[in-house]
Image (cartoon, rainbow, N blue to C red):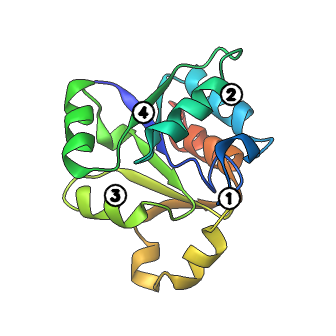
Amino acid sequence: MKKAIFFSGDGTAYKCSDSCFSEKEIYPETLPALRFLARRGFMLVLVTPDRQEYKWFKRYLRNKTLNLMHCSTEIKNLLAFIEEYSICLDKSYYISDGLYLKKFQDIFQDIKCNKILVLSGRGVKTLGQTNADSLREFADICRDIYSAAYSIALNNSSFMV
């Protein structure tokens, strides 16, 4: 079974913007974080309802050596994607600034999928609106996607000191 990193783009991997895709700004830590996770055997999956957003991000990565998959936020599509690629959710993570977090909580309420909240984008606002009981659902709360990648690596190390 495969392990995956599901992540929302806007606010998590690049700057939140209501403007067109050509004006979006990729966070400097995004590429190193995605490379770091890919080298550790994670399938990279951008979760967005907008296929144009995926195409834009894929074009941005065209000269990079990263394999990026796309999955819609529709529940049936997410579940079909997980089944099609034989993804082990116990070893997978969802990284988000809060975008689509409610959908993922609804989908994975009975299935363990690790969730990491990043404070980039809408993350600080999401953290402020989250009650203490809901905070326990997060595997970690990190400054950005890069620190989330290191958190994942530390929590998945094969040895303990």
Tell me how far mark 1 sits from mark 2, CA to CA. Answer: 16 Å
Q: Residue at x 62, y 49 (%)?
A: 148
**Residue matched to label 1:** 17
Residue 17 is situated, as x and y percent measured from the top left of the image, at 68, 58
Q: Earlier in the sequence, mark 1 or mark 2?
A: 1
The C terminus: image quadrant:
top right
Q: What's the amino acid at mark 2?
A: Tyr
Q: Say whether marks 1 and 2 touch (CB < 8 Å).
A: no
Is residue 129 positioned above or below 138 on the image? below
Q: Residue at x 60, y 53 (%)?
A: 10
Tell me how far mark 2 sits from mark 4, CA to CA. Answer: 14 Å
Q: Earlier in the sequence, mark 2 or mark 4?
A: 2
* Relative side of 85 to 36, left or right: left
Q: Nearer the viewer, residue 74 or 126?
A: 74
* Relative side of 159 to 47, left or right: right
**Residue matched to label 4:** 70
Q: What's the amino acid at mark 3?
A: Phe
Q: Say whether marks 4 and 3 touch (CB < 8 Å).
A: no
Front: mark 1 or 4: 1
Crowding at dot 2, Cα within 10 Å, few <14 / some 14-19 / many 20+, comes out as: few
Which label sits on residue 60?
Answer: 2
Q: What's the amino acid at mark 4?
A: His
Q: Say whether marks 2 and 4 touch (CB < 8 Å).
A: no
**Residue matched to label 3:** 104
Is residue 50 positioned above or below 138 on the image? above
Q: What's the amino acid at mark 1?
A: Ser
Query: Could you tell me if residue 26 is visible in this image?
Result: no
Q: Residue at x 58, y 26 (%)?
A: 58
Q: Say whether marks 1 and 3 touch (CB < 8 Å).
A: no
Crowding at dot 1, Cα within 10 Å, few <14 / some 14-19 / many 20+, comes out as: few
Crowding at dot 4, Cα within 10 Å, few <14 / some 14-19 / many 20+, comes out as: many
